[in-house]
Image (cartoon, grey):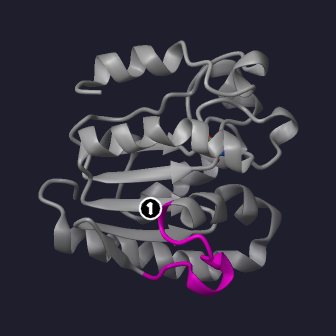
Amino acid sequence: MKNWEGLYAACMSCQNCPLAQTRTNVVFGEGPTNAEVMFIGEGPGEQEDRTGRPFVGRGGQLLDEMLGIMGLDRSRVYIANMVKCRPPGNRDPLAEEQEACIGYLRNQVALLRPKIIVCLGRIAAMKLIRPDFKITREHGQWVEKAGVQMTAIYHPAALLRDLSKRPETFADLKSIREHIQAVCDHTL
Ligand code: URA
């Protein structure tokens, strides 16, 4: 797909997997198309399915606070998900659903050409960094893939469930802030 408009239109009418039957809205993702930093979550929850926007529920509020710690806000970053339609009951997206959807995300990355990708949680990290990625051991570590600096941090929903993960995440967010300062032109 050569442009954002075409990609958006294709995604909106997607019938590639059974999640199309149960979705209210496709959650394409959002942010400026010149964003240098991209965040990739797992999939829409209830609020996201209702509104068509990524990370607008409780996890989204926490993500906004996390962006603040990184010196960012939503006007400067692109936020997308591994799957664009809500898995019923907020279960993890199935491997075949991720496979059916990954082309949209790859297109988004190709059009955006971010300098930094931050995976939010295990699901995105396993698909985008390494299939055996262990979020508990490897969160906050950096890898370079095709010229893009990539890292993974705990998903906001995991941080809502488990407060003990927050100090480590705070350190990861500071490291991301430093990386942004080192590699981005206009983000900070
Ligand atoms: N969780 C996600 O992974 N993505 C969203 O958009 C909302 C919650």
Q: Residue at point 56% right, 60% down?
A: 127
Q: Residue at point 42% right, 32% down?
A: 30
Residue 157 sits in quarter: bottom right
Q: Is residue 55 visible?
A: no
Q: Horizontally, is 186 left or right of 26 in the view?
A: left
- Quadrant (top left/top right/bottom left/bottom right) for the C terminus: bottom left
Q: Is residue 134 magenta?
A: yes
Horizontal and vertical percent position of residue 89: 87, 37
Q: Horizontally, is 26 left or right of 174 in the view?
A: right
Task: Report the front residue among 84 and 96.
Answer: 96
- Quadrant (top left/top right/bottom left/bottom right) for the N terminus: top left
Q: Horizontally, is 152 left or right of 7 in the view?
A: right
Whether 141 is drawn above or below 109: the answer is below
Residue 87 sits in quarter: top right
Horizontal and vertical percent position of residue 168: 60, 82
Whether 136 is drawn above or below 102: the answer is below
Secondary structure mostly seen in the magenta stretch: loop
In the picture as drawn, the residue positioned furthest to the right comes out as 89
Horizontal and vertical percent position of residue 182: 18, 74
Note whether ligand 1 is within 8 Å of mark 1. no
Q: Is residue 53 visible?
A: yes
In the picture as drawn, the residue positioned furthest to the left comes out as 185
Task: Report the front residue among 166 and 81.
Answer: 81
Whether 21 is drawn above or below 162: the answer is above
Q: Ligand 1 quadrant?
A: top right
| Residue at numbered disc 1 | 118
Q: Residue at point 59% right, 32% down?
A: 84
Question: Are there few (<14), some (14-19), or many (20+) residues within 10 Å of tag 1?
Answer: many
State which region is magenta: 128-141
Whether 76 is drawn above or below 139: the answer is above
Horizontal and vertical percent position of residue 67: 45, 56
